Image (tube, rainbow, N blue to C red):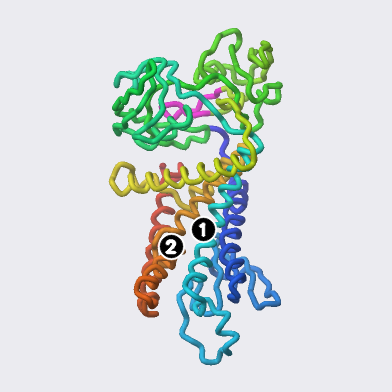
Amino acid sequence: MTGSPGLLTTIFAFLLVLGPLVLIHELGHYLVGRLFGVKADAFSIGFGKELAGWTDRRGTRWKLSALPLGGYVQFAGDMNPASAAAAADPRLTPAERAQTFHSKPLWQRALIVLAGPMTNLLLCVAIFAAFYGTQGRLVDDAEISGFEAGSAAQKAGMRIGDRIVAIDGDDVDGAFDVAGRAAYFPGKTLSVAVEREGRTVVVPVTLAERVLTDQFGNTARIGDLGVRMMPPVVGGFYGDSPAEAAGLKLGDRIVSVNGVAVSGFEEIPELIRPNAGRSVDLTVRRDGALLTLPVKVAEATLTDATGKPRKVGQIGVRAGRLEQVGPLRAVGLGFSQSFRVMGDMVTGIMQIFTGDRSVRELGGPVKIAQYSGQQFTLGWEAFVSFAALISINLAFINLLPIPGLDGGHLAFYAAEMVRRRPLGARSQEWAIRTGVALVLALMVFVTVNDLASLPIFGG
C-alpha cells in the first residue's frame, strides 16, 4: 500500500472534515430556532468539558468542547443537550417563557429539529452540484465491449454489443452506474435488462463476489458482473497526476501506451503498472488529431494477494467523458446523487440486518479519521467528495427514529400530532435516556470494530 498519512495529518484531516460538518448541522438548528424566537443557552462543537468559549449579547454560550465527535445546541427550556424538556420554571416571565423551545407550536419545533439534518443534506447537494457545474457530468456507455475471465454476465448469456439499460427494474445511466449498483449485491441474482438487436432482453445474473484493495490497503467486498464497458477516455485526474502534468486534458482518448493499442480503460493500468519511475509514451486522440505525450510514471506501493508490498506505476487518470451542464441541471444532479448515496446506505444497513454483510463492515470515528487522512493525501477534490459523503451520513443517521437523535424527536412530534397532546415528560425522558444509551453502545461497538481492523491489532 502507499505510504499512509502520519498521525498528525490524520488528526488534522479528521477535524477538518468533522468540525465544519458539525458546525453546519448545529447552525441549521440554531438559525431556524432564532427565526422562531427561541433562545439558545449553549452552542457547542464537541461534548464534555469546555476548552474555550465566549458568551454573546443574547446570552448564548459558544464553546469548543473536549470530545470532538459531534455537537449540540441547548435551547432555553431544555434539561440537557439531548433536548429533553426541563420542568417548568415558575420564575420565568411570560416573555422568557415564550423564548423556550418547548413553548413553540409543534410545526415550529419540528422544523427546528429537521433543520440540522437538512443543512447536511443541502451541503452534500451543493458539493455535488459544484462538481457537476464546474467539471461537467461524466458520461460513459453501458455497451459491453468484452468480458473478464469467468464473467458472471457471460455465463448468464449476455453478449458483446449488449447495452445494459436497467438493473432490477431501475434504469441505469452508463457503465459507472452499472458497476455502482452491482457492487452492493455480491453473490445475489439480479435481473439485468439489455438492448440487443433492437429489442429488450432481461437476463438473470448471479453476481460474482470480488474483494477490492485500494492503494492504502483498504478492502471492500463487491458484486461484479465481469463486463468491460469503459472507453479509454480521460474523464478526470486525481492527486498530483503525472498525466495532467504531461499535458493530457479531459476528453483525450488514449489509443496506445508505448505503442500498445488499447480499446478499454481497464487495459491502461495493466500497461502502466510495470513502468513505475519510468517514462511512457501515451498516444491520444484530441479534436480528431493524434498526439504522443511522454509521461513520467509515478511510483506507488500496493500489497499483492499474499499481503506483500510491490511497487507499481500510476499516472493519476480516471475514465469517462465529460458533458457540460448548466446550473439548474447541476443542482438536479446534485440532489439525485445525494439521494442515491442515501439509498446505498439504506441498502447496506438492511444487508447487515439480514446477514448478507458482516457487522465488521460498520465503521466509526477511528475509520472516519483513517479515511479522512487518506483522502486528504489524494488532493482537495477527493477530500471534499469524502466530506460530502460524511455530511450525508450525518444527515441520514440523525434522521433515524432513535430517541436522543433528531429523528427520535421527530417521532415524538408525530406521536404528539396523532394523540393531540405530547407524550408525558417522564416517558420522553426515559426514551431519550434509552436512545442515548443505544447510541453510546453503538459508538463503543464501531470503535472497537475500527481498532480491531488496524494492523497494530492484527487487522
Q: Provide residue 56's location: percent of width, then percent of height.
A: 69, 74
Q: Identify the amino acid type marked 1.
A: Pro
Image-based side of 373 in relation to 242, left or right: left
Residue at image point 59% right, 67% down = 30
Q: Quadrant of residue 26?
A: bottom right
- Which circle marks residue 407 in the picture? 2
Residue at image point 63% right, 69% down = 63
Work out whether residue 223 or residue 275 is closer to the camera in this orientation and state it. 223
Q: Is residue 299 visible?
A: no
Q: Residues within 10 Å of mark 1 (few under 14, many from 20)?
A: many
Residue at image point 48% right, 67% down = 110
Span colored in magenta: 302-312
Q: Is residue 130 above or below residue 66?
A: above
Q: Residue 175: say if magenta.
A: no
Residue at image point 69% right, 15% down = 293
Work out whether residue 253 or residue 23 is closer to the camera in this orientation and state it. 253
Q: Provide residue 19's location: percent of width, then percent of height.
A: 60, 56
Image-based side of 292 in relation to 367, left or right: right
Identify the secondary structure beneath mark 2. helix
**Quarter of the figure with the C terminus:** top left
Tags 1 and 2 in contact by the CB under 8 Å rule?
A: yes
> What is the residue that sits farthest to the front in this orientation?
198
> What is the residue that sits farthest to the top in this orientation?
259
Q: Identify the amino acid type marked 2.
A: Gly
Q: Residues within 10 Å of mark 2 (few under 14, many from 20)?
A: many
Q: Is residue 167 above or below residue 344?
A: above
